[in-house]
Image: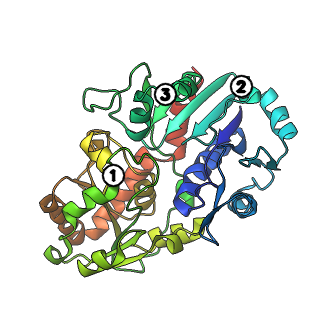
Amino acid sequence: MKILFAGIIARHPYGGVTWCSLMYLQGLMDLGHEVLYIEDTGECIYDAARDTISTDPSFGTRYIHDALEPFGLGDRWSFVNYDGSYHGLSREAVRTYCDDADLFVNLSGGSWFWRDEYRRIPRKVFVDSDPVFTQLAIAKGEDWYVGYFREFDHLFTFGANIGTPDSDVPTGEFAWQQTWQPVITRLWHTRMPPTRDRFTTVMTWQTESFTDVDGNKDREFVRFLELPPHTHSRFELAVNGPHALLRDHGWAPVDAMRVSRSLWDYRDFIQGSKAEFGVAKHAYVSRRSGWFSDRTACYLTAGRPAVVQDTGWSAHLPSGTGLVAFTTPAEAIAGLERVERDYPTHTQRAREIANECFDASRVLPPFLEKACA
């Protein structure tokens, strides 16, 4: 198949966001499909070098090229700037590609436009990596937003409970199908031991989007703020939040942007970690969305166990060894101690769960079957 894939690499030029798109692209190519990356959000790029939103797309276009080029996609992308100008492949080249494309995959709003060339593609699907927020935004009933989602043939989400009795998230007229983040296991496997005896994570304290939804990670994290003195485990958080507060409570924060400045920095941080300790956004937890982090899938694939907050995902994925769910501080402490007691067993099981549940060769074929139905 010929697939047009929309992502948000330039709008959010961070290692984790980039891997999310890249592993779809590489996974689809591994299955023998032809792919073209497009970014068409109508927004300006974030220039990480100057820490500002910029009308000049050059930082973003360099970042896209540098991320995709090692995977044979250096000439297989196009970025549409806020002013409608095309960078990378021209609009004419994109239109020509779309003329006989078979599938349009829009990840996380990689395009907020319905250009004629996109509409002509026979099958069009949206992949929602940010459940709850997306559905609550649709529920407001704004005509353009509801109309935008109506034009997709299928809607997918990382929230395994969305649209089921286990979650109270409103879905209205839309049906959401569950999928997980595909992981290219060969790019994440490592037999090297961790370089730091730390439980780590990469996290955003608060997001700027969906500010009317009280659902950010800070609201959940404060429930576990006092945890470090009650466990022998040590922590290191790559976070853009209140470093002084976190340091005072034993969390050893580091700069999230430094850790996430490239694909390779992000991967090095995860592979160098002992394991992950992760707290979810309040919206994911309170609404029992069943969301599971693409970041945690990478930890598992690297053979790094994960002790992560349960959003309802434990009903869909193995939990107990290698991957440990918690809902309370006491459960979190118990999970950390379990990993510490038998680290080699948890490491092996983490890899097994990743191969069973997130390997792209397992995730993408059923996704494509549903997308093309």
Residue 121 numbered tag? 2
- Helix, strand or loop under label 2: loop
How many numbered markers are drawn?
3
Indicate the quadrant where residue 331 lies: bottom left
- Helix, strand or loop under label 1: loop
The three-letter code of the residue at mark 3 reads: Glu
- Helix, strand or loop under label 3: loop
The three-letter code of the residue at mark 2 reads: Ile
Q: CA distance from mark 3 to mark 2?
A: 25 Å
Indicate the quadrant where residue 111 lies: top right
Residue at 78% across, 48% down: 76
Q: Residues within 10 Å of mark 3 (few under 14, many from 20)?
A: few
Q: Position of residue 70 (x, y in %)?
A: 72, 61
Residue at 53% across, 30% down: 145
Question: Which residue position is annotated with label 3?
Answer: 142
Image quadrant containing the C terminus:
top right
* Above or below: residue 159 compared with residue 344: above
Q: Position of residue 126 (x, y in %)?
A: 55, 33
Instruction: Identify which residue, 193 or 110, lies in the foreground.
Output: 110
Q: Residues within 10 Å of mark 1 (few under 14, many from 20)?
A: many
Instruction: Identify which residue, 231 or 260, lies in the foreground.
Output: 260
Q: Residues within 10 Å of mark 2 (few under 14, many from 20)?
A: some
* Among the two numbered marks 3 and 2 on one chain, the one whose residue lies closer to the N terminus: 2
Q: Can you tell which of label 1 and label 3 is closer to the viewer?
A: 3
| Left or right for 10, reference 302 | right
Instruction: Identify which residue, 75 or 128, lies in the foreground.
Output: 128
* Above or below: residue 174 compared with residue 326: above
Question: Which residue position is annotated with label 1?
Answer: 281
